[in-house]
Image (cartoon, rainbow, N blue to C red):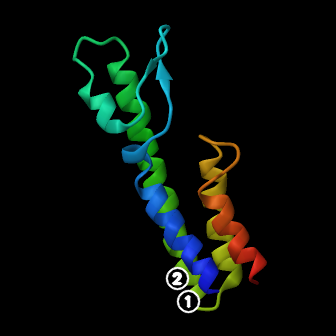
Amino acid sequence: MSSANNELDKAIATASSWAETGWSMTFGPRNVQVNSLKEAHELRNGFPQRLEAISYWEDIKTLGQETAQHGKKAKAALEKGDLNGAINALYLARYMEKRVDENSPTWGPAYLAVVDNS
């Protein structure tokens, strides 16, 4: 299960920093690129999509923290030998991530590492 633990640690760290590391994201009719929460806060106060960008990245921050909590639950479940509990927690994290990326690049590999090592 060490590869599963490594994947879990990596996914927890990645999800916890989604809003900080960000990804390519555009806002408004002019498709202004705002790729992180920091960039959203740096927009000038009069910028029309500033609040939209901040709101989006704050939601991503919350989502990342919530999925990271599920990852921690999965780790704790594995430590107790509760494979079903770990799989359920990771399934939920993966499902939640699909709101922002259908391919689930953070939690998909962690889920598969646990399932494949079961």
- Residue depicted at 42% across the width and 33% down the height: 35
Q: CA distance from mark 2 to mark 1?
A: 5 Å
Q: Quadrant of the N terminus?
A: bottom right
**In the depicted structure, whether residue 46 falls above or below residue 101:** above
Please state the horizontal and vertical placement of residue 51, each as a whole percent of the image: 34, 22
Locate residue 21 relative to residue 74 in the image: left or right: left
Q: Quadrant of the rendered structure where residue 45 is?
A: top left
Locate residue 109 relative to residue 9 in the image: left or right: right
- Residue depicted at 47% across the width and 8% down the height: 30
Please state the horizontal and vertical placement of residue 115, each as a whole percent of the image: 75, 75
**Which label is found at residue 76?**
2
**Which label is found at residue 79?**
1
Q: Quadrant of the C terminus?
A: bottom right
The foreground one among 111 and 96 is: 111
Asked if the residue at tag 1 contacts the one at tag 2, i.e. Cβ–Cβ closer than 8 Å, the answer is yes
Q: Residues within 10 Å of mark 2 (few under 14, many from 20)?
A: some
- Residue depicted at 47% across the width and 58% down the height: 14
